[in-house]
Amino acid sequence: MLTLTIVLRIVALLAFAGLTLLTVSWSRGQAKTRARQDRGDRAPLVANLTAFGLFFLSLLIFSSSPAGFTALLLALSGSLLALMGAALVVRCRAELGAAWSFAPKADQSTGLVTTGPYRLVRHPIYLGLALLVMGEALAFGSWPALFIALSGIVPTLAWRARAEEKLLSRTFGERFEVYRQRTKMIIPYLL
C-alpha cells in the first residue's frame, strides 16, 4: 500500500511537471511568431506564481505519512483529480492555438476563441489548474497545501480571469460581451 501511495503521489506531480514542460515548449514555439499584441496587467500573474511557489513548498513540508488506507485513498482520488485538471488544461491550450499566452494578451488576428471547452466557460484553463492543485494537495494529504490552493491559488486565478476579461472586452467589444453573457466564467452552468 505504501508503494502504491507513493506512485500515485508521483503521478500527481508528473501531471503538473508534464504540463509545465508542454507550456515551456509551446512558449518557445510562439516566441518567434508573435506580433504586437495588446497585453494585460501582469500583477495577477506574479501573484499567481507566488501562490504556486508557496503551494509546492507546503507540499514538501506538510505531507502526511504515505502509509495507511486513508493515505492511499487520498493519493488515488487526488491523482485522478490532478490528471483530469492537467488534461483539461492541455485540451484548452490546444483549442487556443496561437491565441494562447502565459501572460494575458488579446489580439484581433488570433480572434476570440469560443469553441471546445470555451463554449461552456470563459476560463477553463483556470478550472483545470484549480483541479490540478487541489488534486495534488489531496494526493499528498497536505491540508496546508489545500488551504493555500483554496485561499491563494484559486483567488489569484480569479484575479487573472478578471484582468483577462477587461483586456478581452477592450479588444473584442460587443462580440466578447455577447460571449460573456451566454457562458459562465469558470464552472460550467454555475459560476
Image (tube, rainbow, N blue to C red):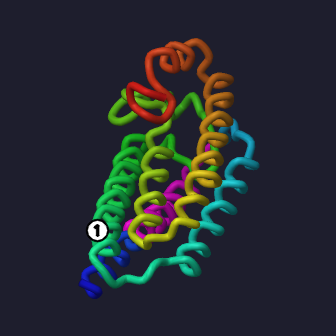
At horizontal 62% and vertical 16% (from top left) the residue drawn is 173
Q: Residue at x 55, y 80 (%)?
A: 60
Residue 34 place in picture, x, y as percent: 59, 48
The quadrant of the picture occupied by the N terminus is bottom left
Q: Nearer the viewer, residue 84 or 100?
A: 84
> Residue at label 1?
73
Foreground: 137 or 157?
137
Q: Nearer the viewer, residue 109 or 178?
A: 178
* Image quadrant assignment for residue 96: top left
Q: Position of residue 47 (x, y in %)?
A: 71, 54
Q: Quadrant of residue 39?
A: top right
Q: Where on the picture, by quarter, is residue 190?
A: top left
Specify the principal SS of the magenta part.
helix
Say whether residue 20 is magenta: yes
Q: Residue at x 53, y 60 (%)?
A: 146
Q: How many marks?
A: 1
* Residue 121 at x, y percent in the picture: 43, 31
The reply, left or right, for residue 107 in relation to residue 79 is right
Instruction: Determine the residue located farthest toward the bottom in the rendered image.
Output: 3
Under mark 1, the amino acid is: Leu
- With respect to residue 181, does 146 lie above or below? below
Q: Which residues are magenta?
A: 15-35
SS under mark 1:
helix
Above/below status of 33 relative to 69: above
Q: Which of 136/177 is in front?
A: 136
Residue 183, given in percent of the width and then of the height, sits at: 44, 22
At 65% across and 68% down in the image, what residue appears? 54
Badge 1: residue crowd in 10 Å (few <14, some 14–19, many ≥20): some
Left/right placement of residue 158 relative to residue 84 reads right
Residue 163 higher or lower than 48, as above or below = above
